Image (cartoon, rainbow, N blue to C red):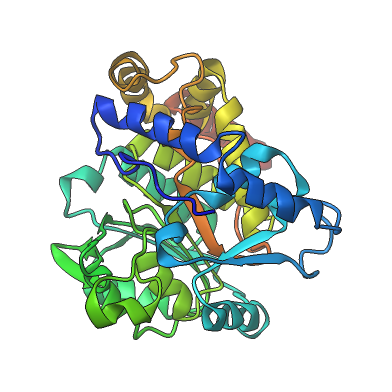
Amino acid sequence: RVQTAPEGWNGDLQRQSAIDVQQAWDAFAGPDSPARQLLCWLGERESAPVGVDQSAPRTVLLLPSDLTSLPWLALANDMDTQICTRIELAVSVSAWVHGQRARTDSAPTGTAGQVIIDESNRDFGRGSIGWTEATLTAAMFGAGPPVAATMGSVLRALQVRGHVHLILHGRFDRKDPRRSAMTANGHDLPAWLLAGCNIKGDVSLASCTTMLSGCGQGTAHYLGPVGVGAVLSAAGARSVLGPLWQSQEWPSMVFHTMWIEARRTMWAGQALATVQRNMRAMTREEFENWVEKYARHQVPAMKAYLEVVCPALNLNQDFPLAHPWCWAGYTLLGDAPPLPDLRPLKETRSWRNWLASVSRAWRWISQIR
């Protein structure tokens, strides 16, 4: 039986897109869908306990290009079976072998990683939600402030050991997937160029449609799955995480921040499952508290998201991140062990807390004198 992508799966950021994604998700994840039956069959044959010995034999799915663009891991997490932490996606046997070798040969040590953002684009400028995502994740990496995106900075970061988080615009070309690209400072970084990189660590992409893949037309059909995420995986990345479709800035910020924080103690696949479940279960009050705690300056924007964007996109305001459009599109190629060098996410310090800390420091200095 063949599972195909329902029409409307990759809607744009309009009200209809959220409805399309919900309908497509219902078709893909339905009780009688071929995808669910396949994962159920695989789950029945898994013997390793959940969360035990991630290096043990695991189920690796090698799918044709027209099926790699479906949210298999989101469905596995939705099923609540042990298969959700034992399944791994790969674009080819060679890419999987590269990833296996990289887990030991190129294990990131020292500097935890780097964040690169295209601040020249107004969507990611200073003060934007994307910029907040960049500063939060950069703080956890402990490698200084976010780096401005250029072709050179992106290519250099991808070839240095550690985790690189890219906040760029992405584009998938269905006619010729080799021309799928990310944009850095107005210049395209196409998949065919990225294929020449020698990637040594983990990559996470806050870039729309970068995990889509296809085989193109004519002789390109023999290349196998090609797209930005697929090429990065084939170029040696231990793991590549990103969205299958266009995503809204608020779900993206919450997802990537929570995911990188989870990577301190979890394997990449386990962290993905945990964050997706947490986002689905997050209530409005919990969401407001999370923003208040970690991104206080974005509270006005958060209220606009809850009161304007959610109704316009037909999202549940009581569970603002529970819609599949917010969490199901994130997928992972490969897997990788925890990154203990990452720092914990820190709370936002208000000016009152800052004054209080200064006052305490002054009293402490006075006592010493």
Q: Which quadrant, please, contains the C terminus? A: top right
- Residue 295 rendering spot, x and y as whole percentages: 43, 33
Horizontally, residue 222 falls left or right of residue 52, namely left
For the question of whether residue 365 can be seen, the reply is no
| Residue 154 point in image, percent of width and height | 31, 71
Which residue does the image show at 17% across and 63% down from the upper left? Answer: 185
- Look at the picture and state if 283 lies above or below 190: above
Q: Quadrant of residue 248?
A: top left
Tell me if residue 241 comes above or below residue 131 in the rendering: below
* 61 is higher (above) or lower (below) than 327: below
Asked where in the image residue 312 lies, by quadrant, the reply is: top left
Residue at coordinates 68% horizontally, 81% vertically from top-left?
A: 104
Can residue 187 be seen by looking at this rendering?
Answer: yes
Image position of 61 (left or right of 207): right
Q: Where is residue 153 in the image (x, y as percent from the top left)?
A: 29, 73
Q: Which residue is drawn at 35% across and 47% down?
A: 245
Q: Which of 203 and 223 is in front in this view?
A: 223
The residue drawn where x is 25% and y is 77% is 152
The total number of labels drawn is 0
Report whether 60 appears left or right of 115. right
Who is closer to the viewer here, 320 or 146? 320
Q: Where is residue 145 in the image (x, y as percent from the top left)?
A: 38, 57
Residue farthest to the front?
1
Residue sitting at the far left: 186
Judge whether 257 appears above or below 220 on screen: above
